[in-house]
Amino acid sequence: MEHDGTGFQPSLEGPILCVNNCGFFGSAGNMNLCSKCYKDEILKQEQAKIAASSLKNIVTGPSCDSETVTESAAAQTDLVEVKTITSPSLNSSSSVKEDPSRCGTCKKRVGLTGFNCRCGSVFCGLHRYSDKHECPFDYRTEAQDAIAKANPIIKAEKLDKI
């Protein structure tokens, strides 16, 4: 390989995909991770170090020996990794809730121009009709009930035959 004096060494293999299979390209300087995955990995490592050091400060006392501290610190790092893995799933479940200022179908901001549907959601001008947003509201039975209430059955008494 030739060096051009800048410290850059060209790769003969070509681009490397991220190890986390996120679809982006990774680099050897980032442990074959893309920039986002690399930042997440660094944050996980920092959180584990902080948790281990805080646990060590809490646990260490005059009666504790070093083996107990290292075992509890190792257990704490496992707990930290579990917490960081489960926390995004909690955020995703809270993002499933519909925002009243966004369209229920395309998530476009509607603000005051949104249309309220009988199903309880707000929609933009394109999705305001029930056939455009797959509305679960049953208009047919609602209309039948309204007609039945508005037009009660009137049955006259039979006339006696002469």
Image (cartoon, rainbow, N blue to C red):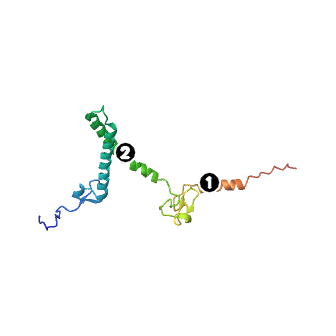
User: Which residue is depicted at the point 30% across and 55% down?
Assistant: 39
User: Which residue is depicted at the point 33% across and 37% down?
Assistant: 59
Q: Are marks 2 and 1 in contact (CB under 8 Å)?
A: no
Q: How far across and down, in percent of the image, does residue 27 sit?
A: 23, 59
Indicate left or right for 46 with 131 as reference. left
Q: How far across and down, in percent of the image, does residue 49 sit?
A: 30, 46
Secondary element under disc 2, as helix, strand or loop, is: helix
Secondary element under disc 1, as helix, strand or loop, is: helix
Tell which of 85 and 124 is nearer to you.
85
Indicate left or right for 157 with 98 as reference. right
Looking at the image, is mark 2 or mark 1 earlier in the sequence? 2
Q: Quadrant of the N terminus?
A: bottom left
Indicate left or right for 106 with 38 as reference. right
Q: Which residue is mark 1?
A: 141
User: Which residue is depicted at the point 28% across and 34% down?
Assistant: 68
Indicate which disc residue 83 carries.
2
- Please say if 83 is above or below 131: above
Residue ranking furthest to the right:
162
Q: Amino acid at mark 1?
A: Thr
> Tag 2: Cα neighbours inside 10 Å, few (<14), some, or many (≥20)?
few
- Please say if 90 is above or below 105: above
Q: How far across and down, in percent of the image, does residue 13 sit?
A: 18, 61
